[in-house]
Image (cartoon, rainbow, N blue to C red):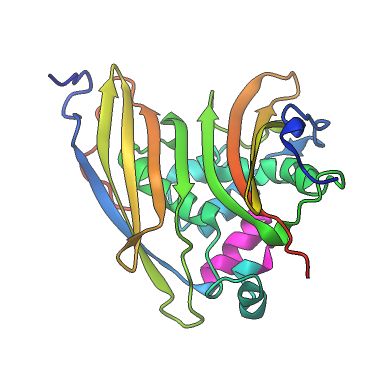
């Protein structure tokens, strides 16, 4: 039996997916905005010296971008009450215009009253880059739009 | 001496107050490629992971603690959790305080879990940021 207090939202409901390109330009932009200047996110020689295959995206950039799937759906990011991710694999970002694409998808994992738990997947080159990613949102009694561009 | 399981419970002094600005919120949202209208205008709220920006100086206290002998070059972010009582907003003055929750010693590495509490100036809680970092021990040359 499924608890479906929020109309139309039930366990298994899929959220609109999102594909985002991570380029070096985006890493530089995020580094500045987040004030995270670890050189593994911009310096090839430094990244290799510490044993990485190349420059990698900030885990927090992947985490923050993944949540867009949820906040695009909910509309109001202020409804997010908790968010967890495990960083399972680095996202290597090549030094070219295309960068690398990360695909984000999500579905409703639990509904309890107006609290909805969303399970998020992030894939890069066919492999999961986040593990056990879950966001909890309080939808109140408002039904989110089924499709939200952005 | 290096970090040990006995460092669980270690608490650092509160960081300097951080004033959340509308411009910084918009800059951060743009860096995430997020055009949500709530992150823009005169009185925006911050993207949930903006909490990382405010938590950073608290983590710097931990990684810079000479007694623990941690090196950022050998640190990998393993997991991250945020719990929100309310969203961060432009105009908020936020104070971050870090406490070490748990240290697990493994062969060649340490797993360090810590919590950063983000409160307003009246110590009303806004957000809790819990993270685990894997720290590789230095291999003697």
| Farthest residue, direction bottom | A96
Q: How many labels does the image show?
A: 0
Residue B58: name its quadrant. top right
Q: At x 56% / y 72%, what residue is drawn?
A: A55
The spot of residue B93 in percent (x, y) is 72, 32
| Farthest residue, direction left | A1
Magenta range is A25-39
Q: Can residue B97 be seen in this view?
A: no
Q: Classify B9 as above or below B37.
A: above
**In the figure, is residue B119 to the left or right of B26?**
right
- The residue closer to the viewer here, B53 or B44, is B53
- The residue closer to the viewer here, B132 or B88, is B132
Q: Is residue B9 magenta?
A: no
Q: Does the magenta stretch include residue A36?
A: yes
The spot of residue B101 in percent (x, y) is 66, 30
**In the figure, is residue B135 to the left or right of B87?**
right
């Amino acid at each position: 039996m499924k608890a479906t207090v929020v109309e139309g939202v039930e366990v298994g409901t899929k959220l609109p997916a999102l594909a985002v390109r991570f380029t070096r330009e985006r890493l530089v932009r995020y580094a500045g905005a987040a004030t995270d200047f670890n050189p593994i996110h911009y310096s090839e020689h430094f990244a290799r010296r510490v044993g990485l295959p190349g420059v990698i995206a900030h885990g927090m950039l992947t985490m923050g971008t993944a949540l867009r799937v949820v906040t695009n759906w909910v509309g109001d990011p202020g409804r997010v009450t908790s968010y967890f991710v495990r960083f399972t694999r680095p996202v290597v970002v090549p030094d070219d215009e295309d960068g690398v694409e990360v695909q984000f998808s999500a579905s409703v994992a639990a509904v309890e009253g107006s609290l909805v738990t969303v399970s998020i997947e992030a894939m890069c080159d066919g492999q999961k880059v986040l593990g056990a990613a879950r966001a909890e949102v309080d939808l109140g009694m408002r039904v989110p739009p089924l499709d939200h561009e952005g | 001496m290096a970090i040990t399981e006995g460092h669980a419970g270690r608490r650092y002094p509160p960081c300097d107050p951080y004033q959340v600005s509308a411009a910084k919120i918009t800059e951060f949202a743009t860096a995430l490629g997020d055009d949500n209208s709530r992150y823009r205008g005169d009185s925006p709220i911050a993207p949930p992971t903006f909490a990382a920006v405010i938590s950073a100086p608290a983590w710097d206290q931990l990684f810079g603690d000479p007694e623990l002998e941690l090196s950022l070059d050998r640190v990998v972010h393993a997991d991250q959790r945020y719990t929100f009582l309310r969203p961060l907003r432009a105009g908020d003055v936020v104070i971050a305080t870090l406490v070490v929750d748990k240290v697990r010693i493994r062969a060649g590495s340490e797993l360090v879990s810590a919590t950063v509490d983000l409160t307003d100036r009246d110590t009303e809680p806004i957000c809790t940021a819990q993270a685990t970092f894997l720290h590789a021990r230095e291999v003697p040359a």
